[in-house]
Image (tube, grey):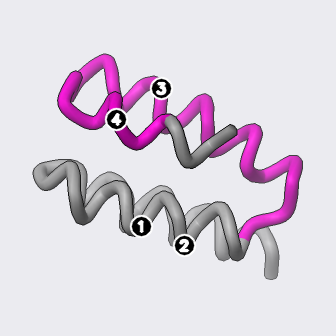
Amino acid sequence: MARAMMEYTKTVLDKVSFDSNLFCREVQKAVQRLLPYEVEELKIFILSLVQQNPELNQCLIYLK
């Protein structure tokens, strides 16, 4: 089940990557819901999105 949440989170983040404010809110929710090792995996995923959309860089602060 935890894996399904991670995949769902990636899908949502990919779909909202056009709006940095919405993306940041979704990142905050994801950090609260996911397990610590999944947050590390999420960081890698978000860094790849940031390379495509540099304006999302501001959301990295939520990943501590």
Q: CA distance from mark 3 to mark 1?
A: 15 Å
Query: Which one is nearer the viewer's eye here, 57 or 5?
Result: 57
Residue 38 image position (x, y, % from top left):
78, 52
How many residues crowd mark 2 within 10 Å: few (<14), some (14–19), many (20+)? few
Region in magenta: 34-60
Q: Amino acid at mark 2?
A: Lys
| Element on which disc 2 rests | helix
Return the residue at label 4.
58
Q: Amino acid at mark 4?
A: Gln
Q: Residue at x 71, y 40 (%)?
A: 41
Assess whether residue 4 is covered by the magenta stretch.
no
Residue 42 image position (x, y, % from top left):
62, 44
Q: Residue at x 24, y 65 (%)?
A: 22
Q: CA distance from mark 2 to mark 4?
A: 16 Å
Which is more foreground, mark 2 or mark 4? Answer: 4
Compared with 9, 44 (above or below) is above
- Tell me if label 3 and label 1 are in contact, CB under 8 Å: no
Q: Is residue 40 left or right of residue 44?
A: right
Q: Amino acid at mark 3?
A: Leu
